[in-house]
Image (cartoon, rainbow, N blue to C red):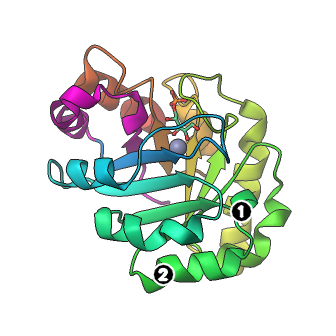
Amino acid sequence: MKKIILSPSALSCDFANAGVQIQQAKDGGAEYLHLDVMDGIFVPNISFGQPVVKSLRKCTDLVFDVHLMITEPIRYIEDFAKAGADIITVHVEACQDVEATLKKIKDCGKGVGLSIKPKTPVSDIVKYLPMCDLVLVMTVEPGFGGQKFMADMMPKVKELREYATANGLSYDISIDGGVGCDNAKLCVENGANILVAGSSVLAKEDIKDAASKLLAAAMAE
Ligand code: DX5
Ligand code: ZN
């Protein structure tokens, strides 16, 4: 069984205080930092770009898990690689040439991630799975933090984990959207091993406590 990793989403932090808050999440057991990049076109919201990733890179050694919610992300892979990303995840729905986009991430020496929106079936990405280090299953419509977790996405998680086992693949499965103490265990039971959490960690008063409680809930017997 893969190690369970908490990846708090920086979208929920107070950017004037980000360094301190990210350290608190790390103290609570977080190993990754999830960075949501939105362009206002692929999703109906704008967040931040390379300059913010670059600044945050200076204040933490957490693994940077960059989630690109942008149209034709191939145009910006090199920029995010240079800004400090460790893993770069793109949406299958946003790429004209998925294979070339994933190859570009690999050529930059970064972890290759591929994501699907709630309405996208696993069958749409099966042929790309051998190229992936990480598959990100959205459990909300991408664009905003603080939405309700869609438990009906769990069969896709299970399908992805079973496919990996049956085909000798070892990609991580990450869940993004509405993850909290009440559903973390369910995600893990279905085969996820990375939990992205925005409002349930970095938006909390006691970030360290929220991170450690979420991890404990995910690992509970
Ligand atoms: C939503 C983003 C998420 C978001 C999660 O489009 O991809 O990463 O920050 O936030 P919560 O955990 O609040 O749903
Ligand atoms: Zn995200």
Q: Earlier in the sequence, mark 2 or mark 1?
A: 1
**Residue 218 seen:** yes
Regarding mark 2 in the picture, which secondary structure is present there? helix
Q: Is residue 165 left or right of residue 3?
A: right
Could you tell me which residue is drawn at 30 percent across and 47 percent down? 52
Q: Is residue 76 left or right of residue 183?
A: left
Amino acid, disc 1: Val
How far from the left and from the top, in percent, is residue 63? 30, 57
Q: Is residue 46 left or right of residue 28?
A: right
Between 213 and 20, the residue placed more toward the observer is 20
Between 56 and 192, the residue placed more toward the observer is 56
Regarding mark 1 in the picture, which secondary structure is present there? helix
Q: Neighbour class for label 2 at 10 Å: few (<14), some, many (≥20)?
A: some
User: Is 11 inside the magenta-drawn segment?
Assistant: yes
Name the image quarter holding residue 201: top left
Q: How many marks?
A: 2
Could you tell me which residue is drawn at 40 percent across and 44 percent down? 7
Amino acid, disc 2: Lys
**Where is mark 1, residue-wise?**
92
Mark 1 within 8 Å of ligand 2, using the beta carbon: no
How far from the left and from the top, in percent, is residue 188? 56, 44
In the image, residue 65 above or below residue 98? above
**Where is mark 2, residue-wise?**
106
Could you tell me which residue is drawn at 47 percent across and 60 percent down? 2
Could you tell me which residue is drawn at 30 percent across and 63 percent down? 83
User: Is 4 inside the magenta-drawn segment?
Assistant: yes
Instruction: Identify the magenta region.
Output: 1-29
Instruction: Tell me, for residue 173, which label it has, or none.
Output: none
